[in-house]
Amino acid sequence: MKRSGAGTLGVEDVGRQVKLQGWVHRRRDHGGVIFLDLRDRSGVVQVVVRPADAPEAASNLAPARNEWVVEIEGAVAARAPEAVNPKVATGEIEVVAAAGRVLSPSAPLPFNVEGEVDATEETRLRYRYLDLRRPELQRNLVLRHEVTFDVLEYFHQQGFLHVETPILTRSTPEGARDYLVPSRVHKGSFYALPQSPQIFKQICMVAGLERYVQIARCFRDEDLRADRQPEFTQVDVEMSFPTEEDVFALIEGLFVRLFERRGITVERPFPRLTHAAARARYGTDKPDLRFGMAIADLGGGLAASGFRAFASALAEGGVVRGLRVPGAAGASRKEVDAWVELARRHGAAGALTLRRRDGESVFQVKDVLAAPEIEFLVAALGLEEGDLALIAAGPETTTSAALGALRLAAAARYERIPDDAWAFCWITDFPLVEWDEREQRFQAVNHPFTAPHPDDVSRLDSDPATVRSRGYDVVLNGYELGGGSIRIHDREMQQRCFALLGISAAEAQERFGFLLEALEFGAPPHGGIALGLDRIVMLLAGADSLRDVIAFPKTTSAADLMTGAPSGVEGAQLDELGLATTAADD
Ligand code: ASP
């Protein structure tokens, strides 16, 4: 008999003989009758084993406990009306066992696979194969598979070729630390695992492939913040002869399709914001546009203010900005203190409140602002009865970052952010470079292959900090889903940009000589983008963590608790590689 899927059975199968193979999800004994919830990838179905009708099955299955693997043969039967469970897909039926046996027992479980999670994250990762049996995690992996499949289908239909680029390669400059792999054959030399396939995909364009896509694994050895993984998956895309518009249309079409197939309507075109506007209005280059609470610039009405904090910030070339928190006029002292603390953590001196209550507007510091100044603030912030405004003053960068963080914190408390809203946007006009104080040189904001904006090229040498790039990011609900750019396809321009980043001609030749050379042989104009697949699936799954959508994730200390990687190796292996270690971690 062919095996049936437990979760696929329903009333239409009543009377059918079926064979099931799967795990005991839950087991109950009622006066000698055994009830097993049998689970396989398709779902769960209830099995009844009556010793009177199937004595051999009952004795075979008597020892079976949770997570034992069993085989059942029997007939699908309708449940009595009072036994119907509308909460379960197969709740109208059960399988009455005629035969049954244990295929594989299970050792006592370190935690329950069924029901509430009752184990620490460490234990769950150590026994990942058990945790993955949870229906929620299985659903996430199914979703991930389907999204991957849809992505490839979409790009295939658009004429893209899936090309695999090497994992053992040279360092690619995405700005993070490389994972290195020692070469046995070339002692003292190392491969680097790719931080991205960036250079290879550009070279694919020089090779005339015109449209490239790859579900690409990337590796970045960074100190991991809460929700990052040292290896992650990108939907990596490159095309020849594109404008920004072509890339935007392509990617919007992808997201519309991915979300539509999951019953979510996404509006296009996605709104666009320049990097400068995003920073000014939302205090971040990845704004959450599911709600308003835009930041207002208040400097215009305060230039002559007698309040020192404002006047001196403006006099020193800084800003005074604020945002309205609707309905927060009654915020407690404690809440305000927490906001001030948050603003400080982002480098601002603090934040001040302006409350509008009982028709009156009260600024936190008494008697420092003139009545017309307060009126100006109320109007500029759009403050209404019952509202509170948070105002910060100081240098542009820290003030903007602080207000961006305050906007999110205050919204979490005072705005009803719909969890089924999907607010995409494009961020454009990034600066090409930013000054790195520590290293005393310019760094690429995107990467060194990003083309400068044609209107700004004339300032490349004289005023590089003001040059915009042709880079862009796509953002959803405050998460950066991906980024890319139109690239440099001209050797001379590429060399100029390397030089601007403090990469000497010799170093450029040593590290990227092959790319510079390739640019001399009819390199087409090209550009592309990379999207974070893990994050896209996480958002679609409604999961809280990337770990919930990656089959075998690592911890924040980049360890794999199941296999024990990273681990020491045999001395002989090191000898063969010509390596010696000087320090062990523990
Ligand atoms: N290589 C870039 C990244 O991984 C994406 C791109 O420019 O296409 O962030």
Image (cartoon, rainbow, N blue to C red):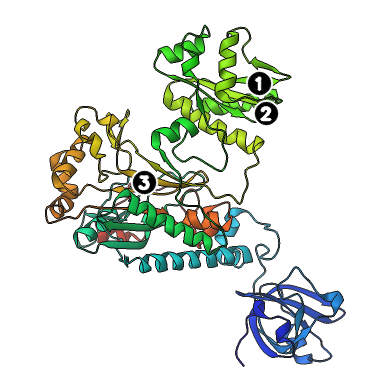
Query: Residue flagged by tag 3: what amino acid is it?
Result: Ala
Above or below, 369 against 422 in this view is above
Q: Quadrant of residue 41?
A: bottom right
Q: What element carries label 3?
A: loop
Residue carrying label 1: 355
Residue 482 rendering spot, x and y as whole percentages: 41, 50
Q: In this view, does 268 lie above or below 39?
A: above
Q: Which of 576 and 488 is in front in this view?
A: 488
Tags 3 and 1 touching, CB below 8 Å: no
Mark found first going from the N terminus, 3 or 1 = 1
Query: Badge 3 is on which residue?
Result: 583
x and y, in percent, of residue 298 in the image: 50, 20
- Mark 2 lies on residue: 328
Q: Are marks 3 and 2 in contact (CB under 8 Å)?
A: no
Which numbered disc, 3 or 1, marks the residue closer to the eye? 1
Of the numbered discs in the image, which one, if any, rests on residue 295?
none
Q: Is mark 1 within 8 Å of ligand 1?
A: no
Look at 69% across and 65% down and name the residue there.
Answer: 114
